[in-house]
Image: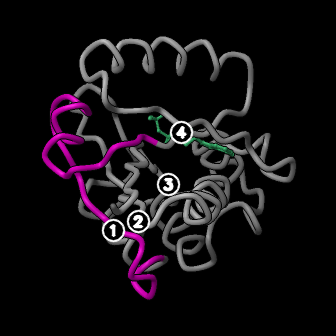
Amino acid sequence: MNKIAIYPGSFDPLTMGHVNIIERGLHVFDEVIVAIAHNTSKKTVFTEEERLEHLHLVFSANPRVKIDRFEGLLVDYARKTGAGSVLRGIRTVSDYEYEFQMALANKRLYPDMETIFMMTDGAYSYLSSTIIKEIIRFGGSAEGMVPPAIADLLKRKLAGV
Ligand code: ADP
């Protein structure tokens, strides 16, 4: 049986912290579906299409990484794709509180689905999409924080060009 995990998120933008979780996820699962969660109430810098494009740029050469988007409940998407697990990353205690709540809610909705947590790599523990956007907005360098293919796109987007 194929072990498939969904790695859901906003990925606005995709960071090296995300990439690290996906790569390590591939050591545990046969396939990782990186799925952009459609969220109308969350204001994003990149459109959903742009974020899909970024994921393709970084992972298109890896046949074990699938790129997708979904609307509605994660458990419904998991049932549809046949994924038995959800992969999530944990950085801080505040991540833990939110993730714990989500995992328990999802367990209640779909008892056969497991949420698998991966601790952040020490090198990326401080990284979030939000902090990277702040750094670039104020003229700092995000080198090593986002995949090189995305760094320039992000700089241009935040500069409004
Ligand atoms: P969401 O809006 O669902 O939190 P994100 O794109 O911010 O989406 O994050 C997706 C997942 O990646 C979450 O589980 C988050 O905790 C995890 N994550 C984000 N940054 C890091 C990092 N630097 N190290 C480990 N996990 C991370």
Q: Between residues 73 and 10, which one lies in front from this camera angle?
A: 73
Q: Earlier in the sequence, mark 4 or mark 2?
A: 2
Q: Between residues 119 and 139, which one lies in front from this camera angle?
A: 119
Q: Earlier in the sequence, mark 1 or mark 4?
A: 1
Q: CA distance from mark 1 to mark 3?
A: 17 Å
Quadrant in which residue 23 is drawn: bottom right
Q: Which amino acid, by three-letter code, is at mark 1?
A: Lys
Decide: is 47 above or below 125: below
Q: Check disc 3 and report the residue beneath it.
A: 13
Residue 77 left/right relative to 113? left
Q: CA distance from mark 2 to mark 1?
A: 7 Å
Q: CA distance from mark 2 to mark 3?
A: 22 Å
Q: Residue at x 32, y 49 (%)?
A: 36
Q: Check disc 4 and report the residue beneath it.
A: 88
Q: Which amino acid, by three-letter code, is at mark 4?
A: Arg
As helix, strand or loop, the secondary structure at mark 4 comes to strand
Q: Quadrant of ligand 1?
A: top right
Residue 149 position in % (x across, y down): 55, 79
Question: Is 60 part of what is drawn in magenta?
Answer: yes
- Please tell me the numbered disc located at residue 66: 1
- Mark 1 in CB contact with mark 3 (< 8 angstroms): no
Q: Tag 4: Cα neighbours inside 10 Å, few (<14), some, or many (≥20)?
A: many
As helix, strand or loop, the secondary structure at mark 3 comes to loop
As helix, strand or loop, the secondary structure at mark 2 comes to strand
Label 4 lies in ligand 1 vicinity (Cβ under 8 Å): yes
Q: Which amino acid, by three-letter code, is at mark 3?
A: Pro
Q: Check disc 2 and report the residue beneath it.
A: 31
